[in-house]
């Protein structure tokens, strides 16, 4: 019986390890790991709660990670946020400078933080443009992706309507996406 239990236990532990690692908050020393994953079409960027007076990351604040394809006919993404306010509606956006961010900007997805303060957003969106767009003041350096309060964003006009930066997650670095059917 012991000969059977040990291999089963080892297999269970090996299978559980990647899940635990992916769910853990990034080590503060590793903060900002981003960009293309090897030679794949997949990239990552972290979003962080920041102090609006200094734009420094708030230690032990809310955070999230966006996984996205660098190119394709659709912007394929998965976003997982943590440490958010329970029951609050959030919207993931492309914010194109200057204010109010509709230069042209884009609504990506929205949802509500669950009972643990987590949010999971995923999809495949036809943006109809590259990121950043040439009208974005950040062009050609990259695009800003933010998680904002849904009540502070108009998804129809793709612009900010309020400003509560202590409640948002901001990109650690700019991203780029090539829409291959534009």
Image: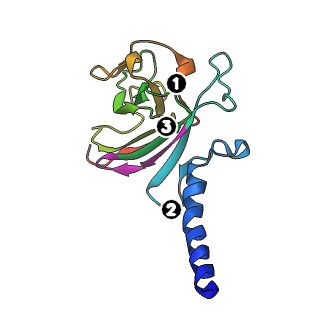
Locate the N terminus and report the quarter of the image it occupies: bottom right
Name the residue beneath numbered marker 2. Answer: 39
Name the residue beneath numbered marker 3. Answer: 118
Spot occupied by residue 144 in the image (x, y as percentages of width and height): 48, 31
Q: Are marks 3 and 2 in contact (CB under 8 Å)?
A: no
Q: Residue at point 45% right, 15% down?
A: 99
Spot occupied by residue 34 in the image (x, y as percentages of width and height): 57, 46
Q: CA distance from mark 3 to mark 2?
A: 30 Å
SS type, badge 2: loop
Examine the rendering and report whether any part of residue 48 can be seen: yes
SS type, badge 3: loop
Badge nearest the viewer, 3 or 2: 3
Locate the C terminus and report the quarter of the image it occupies: top left
Mark 3 vs mark 2: which is more N-terminal? 2
Which segment is the magenta one? Answer: 64-75
Name the residue beneath numbered marker 1. Answer: 168
Question: Above or below — where is 4 with respect to 97?
Answer: below
């Amino acid at each position: 019986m012991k000969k059977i239990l040990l291999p089963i236990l080892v297999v269970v532990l090996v299978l559980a390890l990647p899940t635990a690692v992916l769910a853990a908050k990034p080590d503060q020393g590793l903060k900002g790991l981003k960009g293309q994953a090897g030679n794949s079409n997949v990239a990552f960027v972290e979003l962080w709660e920041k102090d609006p007076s200094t734009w420094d990351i708030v230690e032990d604040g809310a955070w999230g990670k966006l996984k996205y394809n660098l190119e394709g006919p659709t912007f394929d993404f998965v976003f997982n946020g943590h440490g958010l306010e329970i029951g609050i509606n959030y919207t993931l956006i492309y914010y194109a400078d200057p204010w109010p961010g509709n230069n042209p900007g884009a609504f990506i997805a929205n949802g509500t933080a669950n009972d643990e303060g987590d949010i999971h957003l995923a999809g495949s969106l036809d943006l109809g443009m590259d990121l950043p767009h040439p009208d974005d003041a950040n062009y050609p350096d990259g695009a800003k992706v933010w998680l904002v309060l849904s009540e502070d964003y108009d998804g129809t006009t793709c612009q900010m309507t309020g400003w509560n930066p202590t409640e948002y997650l901001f990109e650690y670095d700019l991203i780029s996406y090539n829409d291959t059917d534009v």
